[in-house]
Amino acid sequence: MREGLLQSFARRRNRLLSAPLRAVFLASAVMAAGGCDDATVLLQRNPESIRHMTGEERYETGLRFHEIAQFGDDRLKRLVLALRQSEGGRELYDYAAAHNPPYVEWQTMPGQGGGYSWDSDNSYLKLNPRLSDENLFRTLVHELRHHWQNTALGTKTWVNSPLRDWELKRFSEADACAYTAHFGAAYAAETGNDQLTGGALIGYGDKTSRAYSRKPPSERDYLQDAFVACMEEQDSNYLLYSQGHYLYVKKKSELIRQLFDHVDEAGEYAEFYKRYLDVPGPEETARRFSQFLTPSLNTTDVVPAVKAMSSDAFLGWVKQVTTGVNADYVDDIDKMEKRFNMIRNSVKTVADTQGKSRAMAAPGS
């Protein structure tokens, strides 16, 4: 990820912040970079799944993804080799190797976590060596889809309101799940290996992957059977996702409010607006979100049902599928959205006034 959204502003405009607020600011930037982003990608619940360390793992500093085939330990090499056995796997491998290749390393995780990824100056991907090779394979595909989201769609650079941040977090997770389901079905059909779609149902997306793969290819509906199914699975069995996403949105919203309280000291209304409040209109927002809904790595290969929707209809559908089951979260995010819009309108009014005043004062005006 590029440096944290709020962290970058603090780095350049430190004089706006008191020392206590700077501490809160930097702590939140760490969270925004990964703590609440993808930290619970596979929430394993079956004790059987944490007994698979092979002794082959090396725990030194991670290798860039494209270096694993040559320099990785035997287990990582097997994982990458398995990925490259299908056409879709080779496409995914080539993409990750060519676009800001993530650092990949082992990290023994508390509980039964599967893996997670985040971006700072570079992209990182952590894998839990306790998982079986099959579960690591699922985790790798899921995480590399997150890497694609960050690099191809540029999601970490988007300026969003609280509601859009909430929708984006939930969309991103469902997208990685849906892509893994589609990838697994295609992998099994091409290689005869169902390690991505068979086995015990122990992690997020496994239920969707199995159901999707068992449907005849001609009857699969990627939007409903993969993406919407993953969103429903998230809401029924993996509510920690929603909790993490909500806490991220809440923390970011509060920090923007705190920055707003301090921006008067420097008068940097225009820069503040550009960095945190200059959200796109409905058409651009719809274009951005629609790019997720492709079973490939091609952002123009959007499913026909989405292409057929108007921007307003599509954004209405996005809101419907991302609302979630926790009414308290929905109510609180609605309040954050209203406060964000109030701040946005206030800052834009002052920034526009300042811009006109400076233009009138410029020589020759």
Image (cartoon, rainbow, N blue to C red):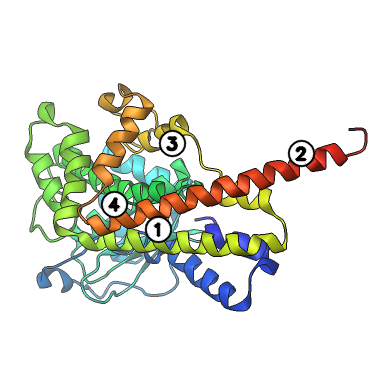
Quarter of the image with the C terminus is top right
Q: Residues within 10 Å of mark 2 (few under 14, many from 20)?
A: few
Considering the numbered disc 1 on the image, is that residue within a helix, a strand or a loop?
helix
Q: Are marks 1 and 4 in contact (CB under 8 Å)?
A: no
Residue 152 seen by the camera: yes
Q: Check disc 3 and report the residue beneath it.
A: 285
Q: Are marks 2 and 3 in contact (CB under 8 Å)?
A: no
Q: Check disc 4 and report the residue beneath it.
A: 142
Is residue 155 positioned above or below 107 on the image? above
Q: Check disc 2 and report the residue beneath it.
A: 356
**Amino acid type, residue under disc 1 in the picture:** Val
Distance from disc 3 to disc 4, alpha carbons, whole Å, reads 24 Å
Distance from disc 2 to disc 3, alpha carbons, whole Å, reads 29 Å
Q: Check disc 1 and report the residue beneath it.
A: 249
Residue under the point 51% across and 59% down? 122
Q: Are marks 2 and 4 in contact (CB under 8 Å)?
A: no
Residue 195, percent from left and from top: 14, 52
Considering the numbered disc 4 on the image, is that residue within a helix, a strand or a loop?
helix
Work out whether residue 122 or residue 364 is closer to the camera in this orientation and state it: 364
Pointer 1 or 4: first along the chain: 4
Q: In the figure, is residue 244 to the left or right of 349?
A: left
Pointer 3 or 1: first along the chain: 1
